[in-house]
Image: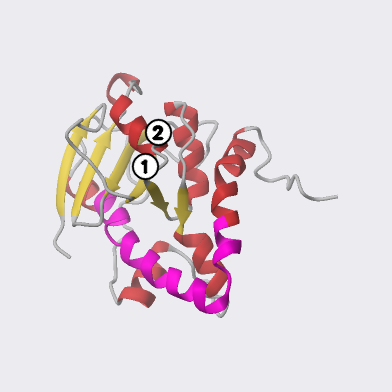
Amino acid sequence: MNLHVQHHFHDLPETVKFDSLVAVDTEAMGLNLHRDRLCVVQLSGGDGICHVVQLNQDHRYDAPHLKRVLTDPDITKIFHFGRFDIAVLYKYLEVTTQPVYCTKIASKLVRTFTERHGLRDLCKDLLSIDISKDHQTSDWGEAHLTPEQLKYAATDVLYLHKIKEILDRRLVREGRQKLAQACFDFLPTCAKLDLLGYSQLNILEH
């Protein structure tokens, strides 16, 4: 798939529209929800175009058009490990992202023959595409992102639509589509529990 990256600052342009599915990912200063600020949100409609929205200029998080997409009930947001992304979006944009789909959860429900459920693993195993994760730990707080960072951010959402299609077929085959949907529906609540400090303490334990 050819990749075209559109780089935006502060918000998604009002002219950018999505249909019923949009792939979403985030980049932050780290993976600690209580310490590491949100820097980038990237989105793709599955057409090879990725919109990279840089939010860290002057720490501005007033992004009404982006928020509208994240909360649109008619657009399902596809994540890979959405638990973190939904939580960091809730903390900084103050919106609950829904409805959602998580390819990592779907993979764990149907690919029980392996413990390899990372995005790179899914791209390689399901699509025969080897993606690079070299810039996963780069400094996303820089005022000027490099072309390599922009390409990395875009790649994280470029293939999620195709991965979802394959995993959906397997969920139906294994009779676990309703269970998967229940997990997806719970993700926004799970994200809020993480922000309250329950990430290491299972609230469902005795």
Q: Residue at x 53, y 61 (%)?
A: 105
Amino acid residing under circle 1: Glu
How far apart are labels 2 and 1 at the CA level? Answer: 6 Å
Residue 93: give x, y in percent of width and height: 42, 27
Amino acid type, residue under disc 2 in the picture: Leu
Helix, strand or loop for disc 1: strand
* Residue at point 26%, 45% (across, down): 18
115 relative position to 63: left or right: right
Q: Is residue 79 magenta?
A: no
Q: Which numbered marker is on residue 27?
A: 1
Q: Is residue 5 above or below residue 66?
A: below
The answer to whether marks 2 and 1 mark residues whose Cβ atoms lie closer than 8 Å is yes
Describe residue 206's horizontal placement relative to residue 66 as left or right.
Answer: right
Check if residue 164 falls in the magenta segment.
Answer: yes
Which sits in the foreground, 183 or 191?
183
Q: Disc number at residue 38?
A: 2
Callout 2: SS:
strand
Check the image and tell me how it is coloured: secondary structure
Q: Is residue 95 left or right of residue 129?
A: right
Q: Which residues are magenta?
A: 152-181
Q: Earlier in the sequence, mark 2 or mark 1?
A: 1
